[in-house]
Amino acid sequence: MVYSTISGVRFPAVPFLHKSPSFHGDRRTSTLYFLLNNDSFSLRKTLAGKFSHDSDSSSFVVAASDKVLIPEGQDDTSSLTEQVENPDMILEDPQALQNLGDLTMKDENKYDDIEAGSSYREVEDKHGSVLSSLVEVNANADAEKTSVSTDRKVKLEGDEVKPKIIPQPGSGQKIYEIDPLLQAYREHLDFRYGQYKKLREEIDKYEGGLDAFSRGYEKFGFTRSATGITYREWAPGARSAALIGDFNNWDPNADVMTRNEFGVWEIFLPNNVDGSPPIPHGSRVKIRMDSPSGIKDSIPAWIKFSVQAQGDIPYNGIYYDPPVEEKYIFKHPQPKKPKSLRIYESHVGMSSPEPKINTYANFRDEVLPRIKRLGYNAVQIMAIQEHAYYASFGYHVTNFFAPSSRFGTPDELKSLIDRAHELGLLVLMDIVHSHASNNTLDGLNMFDGTDSHYFHSGSRGYHWMWDSRLFNYGSWEVLRYLLSNARWWLEEYKFDGFRFDGVTSMMYTHHGLQVAFTGNYSEYFGYTTDVDAVVYLMLVNDIIHGLFPEAVTIGEDVSGMPAFCLPTQDGGVGFDYRLHMAIADKWIELIKKKDEDLRMGDIVDTLTNRRWLEKCVAYAESHDQALVGDKTIAFWLMDKDMYDFMSLDRPSTPLIDRGIALHKMIRLITMSLGGEAYLNFMGNEFGHPGC
């Protein structure tokens, strides 16, 4: 997300958002139209007590099957009692791990046979809260009592499928050895780590571990089985729900859904008599709900593709399930994580020299080879998640599991990523989990007719500067949704990691607005820290690094939160890199001065001012400077002369010569001293890594 500087204070900002009187939200009609002619079944838990700001919320949790995995040759199950209580303990035994690794993973559609209204039991915890746990579950869920996963995707030639392990929490105490100044804030940090460990334990106990919990897309949304299609949606605020779309002529009485006691709506559609799926690939679909705010048609929250047809204002969810022969199959292995990242930040739609919205296919064929030739080893792509308002540059997400349809189809995005891997390039996604679009037509806002569904209610759930909704990270189902979302992009599309947007906004209840961080530790650890959000960031880093060891996570944090880039087992937040945002601000400040007023000591101090053992991504400018509310360094240095005096058929000017020289020197010193990785936004290639 963009941060602007006003009177020495950095504020998040977005471009001017025009509000159309015909709808509520941040949507725009795209100039590119086309229309093409699959998801966790469990229950809701709202975390209460000190951990959650919604302390009066009821606590509901879900348990997986009570069955356990018994290593081969072991008849006595009594020794596994402790492992049942803490499923991941089985990983401590190398032989048990080997036995687990030898198990055959069940079919991806193992939840399709779960019927609504399965038997539940209710027990009370020591605080008197009702804990509802699923007792009778499909036998295929047996393997979910451990945080071990194996790849069930296409195995590339030469690749070895190995178990993936999410490590158990450590002591969380090493951060005090690394930074003794944190000792003064041990009460806050130990409380934070305690909440993280408690949540890990609850997920292990009631969901079968983070591995199972982060596969929500296998249960929610549309899931295909041999006998038909199941659609599930968590919408506790709705009074009634029906699945509508092209497949049933949008008849709200044709496919009425049933609701369980936890607000999960479900319907099973059997295959047609000829064996074909009940919903054809490419069909438009929505869920119609009678909600507290009236009758509402919403795009399914877990939809995998969404498009805006020509002439339409709203988007439509698309049931995307192409025939096997049309599905893209990855051909190339993912590159190993390099010791030093050189990142080319890009936006597919704006990457063409022509005045048009570019496509995944063109970016694959024309832009990726150029990025490789320039010397970069990673490409970071903005605006992947579907966003109805194009001018938000992808930061007002409406459909979190759907790649933007403006640029092409999901399979074309996969081919882009596969081509990058063939070239040896990592592909990082600019993921937005810090907020969501305010759009009620196409997004999650007021999805079930309430403002507290995925978000905090009232003012706490609204970002007044970004005009967007703020997630409730203390909600069980919000955690499932976001954790599954991160895993989905890594598993389904084979992204190599993420740049998490707007992390500062997530970690503080003031969202970094009208706050000048001075580096005083009391600014980081206190009542303004959103512990729920920080714990979510720890969990998502656990999943990413545990299940995808080569994946990279970069956090956009302007505050300088200590231990941000230290492992969660040591008490840190778990990111690999922090964006060194102060560098870009410093360059804008300096290039407005006269050359004789520049001080090398000041420059070096800014470039090297980062926390010990916490890696940074250095950059002279990113999309923040190039797109919104500012000018590129080139324009700051050369301004209008760029239009008339950079041609080969006419002489240059001293301003142009000075500008190009300083442009290259700025990048040279930034890359040399600024961090452990380097980033550049597309189009700003003076002094790129290949020079």
Image (cartoon, rainbow, N blue to C red):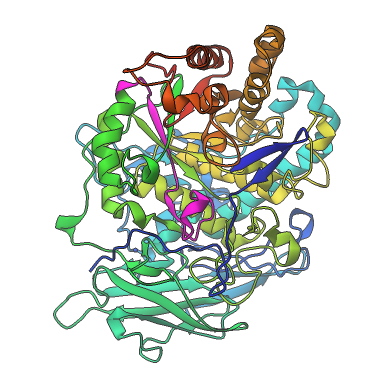
Magenta residue span = 373-399
Which residue lies at the image location 63% right of the left edge and 25% below the top edge?
A: 588
Instruction: Give residue 335's position: percent from left, percent from top.
Output: 33, 29
Q: Does 473 appear above or below 662?
A: below
Instruction: Give residue 265's position: percent from left, percent from top.
Output: 48, 78
Give whichever of 587, 573 is nearer the camera.
Answer: 587
In which quadrant of the rendered image does the C terminus lie? top left
In which quadrant of the rendered image does the N terminus lie? top right
153 vs 510, left or right, is left
| Residue 157: quadrant of the picture | top left
What count of labels does the image hold? 0
Residue furthest to the bottom in view is: 253
Q: Does 159 appear above or below 235?
A: above
Which residue lies at the image location 56% right of the left edge and 37% below the top edge?
A: 624
Instruction: Give residue 296's position: percent from left, percent from top.
Output: 51, 81
64 vs 570, left or right, is left
Q: Does 589 appear above or below 603?
A: below
Give whichever of 83, 21 is nearer the camera.
Answer: 21
Instruction: Let me know if residue 385 is in the magenta part.
Output: yes
